[in-house]
Image: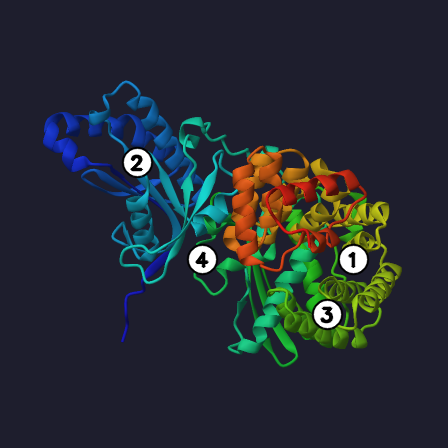
C-alpha cells in the first residue's frame, strides 16, 4: 500500500505572544489592536525578514516563525525584544505591549506550509514560561548560539513543560541584554572568507549494520586529512554527525553548521569490492559542484580518499602552501585489515572517556599496529590512549603508562615528524613532567600541522592557558568551538579557563556555569575562583556549596595536585580564593 511520505526537516522555531493581551483588549480594544498592528508592521515583521525567518502563522496576539538557523532565530528574538523595550519607554506601563519569546531547535513536520511536531510544541511552551520582555531558549538552541550572539543566557534549570513527556533544560536571556544587543553583522561575502565545509555521514548502502564503522572511518579519514589545511574551515566530525541516520536538506544543514559547502555520499561494501559515491554541493544555491562514483577493489580505498580530498581542495579553491600540498594525502595505514581495526577503535574513542572505551580502543589499535608497525598515526593514537590511562590512574600505574605513551609518541614522530597527534601527546606528557617549554612547543606544532582539527586546538588551549599564554589559548578555544558547534561540554571548561586567565571574568563565569549545566559537578572549582576574582564573594560561596554537594570529598590539597604551570603566585591566589569561599583545605 502506498502511503504519502511525511516531509520533515530540522529547523529553529520562534514562538511569541503578547503578555496580558486579554486585559489590554478589555481596557481599549481598538487602541490595543491598532498598537499591535503597528508593532507588527514596524518592528516584528521587519526583524523577522532581516533575520531570514518565515512567518508560518499568526494567532491574534501571537506569531510562529521558522528559521533555518538557531543563531538567526535567537538574534531575531533579542532584536525584537530590544526594539520593543525602546518603544515602551514613552508608553504608560498599563498600556505597554510586552512580548514573551521562546526559541527551540528540533525536527518538524511540514504540511501545507504549516509546521507541527515536538520542535514546534517545545518552542510554544518555552514562550509561555518566558518573562515579560524576555527570551527563553532550549538547551539544543543554546548550544548552537554560544559565542555567536551578542548576549548572555543563564541556565534556568530543567523544566517540566506542559504536555511534554520529558523535562527540558531552559536558558533565559540575561536581564538587560536585549536592549544592549547590537544588530547582527551581515554575513561575510564568500570572497572575503576562507572556504568552509561540512562532511556529512556517508550512508551505509550495504544493508549490514557492521559496515557503519567502515562508512564512519572513511569520513573520519577525509576530515583528518582536510584538517591539515589552513585555507579551509572544516566542521568537526561530532558536529556534522548529528545528522547521522536522518533525512537531511543539505542547504539547511549547511546553515545550521555555518558552512558554504557540503560533502555527502554513500558506501556499499560487498566482499572485496566497494562502491563509493560522493558529491560536493554549494549550499548557497544547492548546485552540485562535483560528483563521482568509485567502483573498485577494497585495496583502493586509500587512493580513493586521496582523490576525494585533492578534488575537494581544488573545487573549493583552497589555497595550499607547499607543505600542505605534501601533507594532503592519506597517512593512517596502507593495510586494509589494519584500517578495519583502526575504525573499530575509533568507534570507542569517540564515545565518553571511560575505562571500558579506552581499553576497547587500545585493543583494536594494537591489532591494527601489529598488522602495520610503520603507521605513525597508529603509534600516535596508542600514545594518546596510554596518556589518558596515566591521567586517570588506569592500567599499570601512572609512571608505567607515561613511559608507554612516550615510547609510542617517540615512534610516531620518528616515522613521521609531521604527525600532529604525536606532537599533541608530547605536549600533554610535557605538562605532567613539568617541562613547560617542551609542552608549549609541541602543542603549537600540533596546531600548525592540523589548524582545522577542533580537538587539537582545544587541547592546545588547555595546555597553553596555565603556562602563561592565556590570550593565545583563548583564540584557539574560540576557533575550536567555531569548528565544532556541537562540541563536548569540556570545551566550555577550557574556554572558560582561557577567559579567566586572560581577565575576562564575566565570560568565564558564563562558560563555567554552562559547563556545569551540561556536566553537573564540573567547572565548579574554577567558578568559585572566578567569582572571587570578580568581586562576588557571595556567589563564590554559593558555588562552593554546589561543589561540595557534587563532590563531598573535595579538598584544596587534592585540587592543588591537578594544577600545572610555573606561576606559583597564581596557584596560591587561586587556593586562597577557594579557602575564602569556605572549602576545606584537606
Instruction: Please identify, in this view, whether the residue under mark 4 or under mark 1 is nearer the observer.
Output: 1
Up-down relation of residue 16 to residue 343 (above or below):
above
Which mark, residue 495? none
Residue in front for this viewpoint, 347 or 295 = 347
Name the residue carrying label 1: 425
State the separation of the CA atoms marked 1 and 3: 17 Å
Q: Which callout, 4 or 1, points at the residue further toward the start of the chain? A: 4
Figure quadrant of residue 318: top right
Give yes or no for contact between labels 1 and 3 (Cβ–Cβ under 8 Å).
Answer: no
Residue 130: image x %, image y %? 33, 42
Q: Which callout, 3 or 4, points at the residue further toward the start of the chain? A: 4
Give yes or no for contact between labels 3 and 4 (Cβ–Cβ under 8 Å).
Answer: no
Q: Is residue 271 left or right of residue 100?
A: right
Q: What's the residue at 11%, 27% (across, down)?
A: 30
State the separation of the CA atoms marked 2 and 3: 52 Å
Give yes or no for contact between labels 4 and 1 (Cβ–Cβ under 8 Å).
Answer: no
Name the residue carrying label 2: 132
Residue in front for this viewpoint, 328 or 388 = 388
Q: What's the residue at 33%, 26% (across, down)?
A: 85
Amino acid at each position: 500500500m502506498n502511503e504519502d511520505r511525511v516531509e520533515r526537516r530540522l529547523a529553529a522555531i520562534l514562538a511569541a505572544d503578547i503578555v496580558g493581551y486579554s486585559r489590554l483588549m478589555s481596557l481599549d480594544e481598538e487602541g490595543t489592536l491598532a498598537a499591535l498592528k503597528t508593532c507588527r508592521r514596524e518592528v516584528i515583521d521587519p526583524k523577522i525578514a532581516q533575520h531570514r525567518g518565515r512567518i508560518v502563522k499568526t494567532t491574534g496576539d501571537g506569531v510562529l516563525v521558522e528559521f533555518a538557523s538557531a543563531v538567526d532565530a535567537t538574534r531575531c528574538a533579542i532584536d525584537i525584544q530590544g526594539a520593543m523595550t525602546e518603544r515602551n519607554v514613552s508608553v504608560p506601563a498599563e498600556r505597554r505591549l510586552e512580548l514573551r519569546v521562546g526559541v527551540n531547535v528540533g525536527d518538524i513536520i511540514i504540511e501545507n506550509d504549516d509546521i507541527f511536531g515536538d520542535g514546534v510544541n517545545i518552542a510554544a511552551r518555552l514562550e509561555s514560561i518566558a518573562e515579560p520582555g524576555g527570551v527563553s531558549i532550549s538547551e539544543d538552541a543554546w548550544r548552537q548560539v554560544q559565542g555567536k550572539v551578542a548576549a548572555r543566557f543563564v541556565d534556568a534549570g530543567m523544566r517540566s513543560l506542559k504536555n511534554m513527556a520529558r523535562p527540558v533544560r531552559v536558558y533565559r536571556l540575561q536581564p538587560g541584554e536585549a536592549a544592549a544587543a547590537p544588530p547582527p553583522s551581515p554575513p561575510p561575502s564568500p570572497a572575503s572568507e576562507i572556504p568552509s565545509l561540512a562532511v556529512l555521514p556517508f550512508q551505509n548502502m550495504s544493508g549490514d549494520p557492521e559496515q557503519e564503522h567502515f562508512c564512519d572511518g572513511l569520513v573520519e579519514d577525509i576530515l583528518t586529512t582536510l584538517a591539515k589545511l589552513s585555507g579551509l574551515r572544516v566542521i568537526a566530525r561530532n558536529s556534522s554527525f548529528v545528522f547521522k541516520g536522518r533525512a537531511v536538506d543539505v542547504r539547511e544543514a549547511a546553515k545550521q553548521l555555518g558552512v558554504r559547502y557540503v560533502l555527502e555520499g554513500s558506501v556499499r561494501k560487498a566482499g572485496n569490492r566497494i562502491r563509493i559515491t560522493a558529491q560536493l554541493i554549494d549550499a548557497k544555491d544547492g548546485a552540485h559542484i562535483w560528483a563521482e562514483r568509485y567502483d573498485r577493489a577494497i585495496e583502493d580505498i586509500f587512493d580513493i580518499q586521496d582523490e576525494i580530498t585533492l578534488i575537494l581542495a581544488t573545487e573549493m579553491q583552497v589555497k595550499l602552501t607547499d607543505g600542505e600540498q605534501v601533507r594532503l594525502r592519506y597517512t593512517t595505514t596502507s593495510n586494509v585489515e589494519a584500517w578495519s581495526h583502526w575504525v573499530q577503535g575509533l568507534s570507542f574513542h569517540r564515545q565518553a572517556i571511560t575505562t571500558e572505551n579506552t581499553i576497547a580502543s587500545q585493543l583494536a589499535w594494537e591489532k591494527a599496529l601489529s598488522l602495520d608497525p610503520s603507521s605513525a598515526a597508529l603509534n600516535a593514537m596508542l600514545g594518546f590512549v596510554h596518556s589518558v590511562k596515566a591521567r586517570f590512574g588506569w592500567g599499570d600505574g601512572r609512571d608505567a603508562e607515561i613511559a608507554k605513551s612516550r615510547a609510542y609518541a617517540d615512534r610516531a614522530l620518528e616515522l613521521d615528524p609531521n604527525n600532529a597527534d604525536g606532537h599533541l601527546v608530547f605536549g600533554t606528557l610535557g605538562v605532567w613532567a613539568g617541562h613547560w617549554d617542551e609542552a608549549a612547543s609541541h602543542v603549537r606544532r600540533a596546531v600548525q600541522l592540523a589548524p582545522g582539527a577542533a580537538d587539537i586546538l582545544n587541547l592546545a588551549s588547555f595546555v597553553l592557558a596555565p603556562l602563561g599564554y592565556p590570550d593565545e589559548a583563548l583564540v584557539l578555544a574560540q576557533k575550536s568551538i567555531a569548528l565544532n558547534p556541537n562540541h563536548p561540554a569540556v570545551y566550555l571548561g577550557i574556554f572558560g579557563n582561557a577567559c579567566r586567565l586572560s581577565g575576562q571574568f564575566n565570560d568565564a563565569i558564563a562558560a563555567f556555569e554552562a559547563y556545569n549545566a551540561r556536566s553537573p559537578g564540573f567547572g565548579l572549582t574554577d567558578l568559585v575562583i572566578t567569582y572571587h576574582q570578580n568581586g562576588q564573594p557571595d556567589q563564590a560561596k554559593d558555588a562552593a556549596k554546589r561543589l561540595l554537594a557534587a563532590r563531598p570529598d573535595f579538598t584544596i590539597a587534592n585540587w592543588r595536585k591537578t594544577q600545572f604551570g610555573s606561576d606559583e603566585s597564581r596557584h596560591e591566589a587561586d587556593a586562597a580564593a577557594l579557602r575564602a569561599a569556605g572549602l576545606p583545605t584537606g
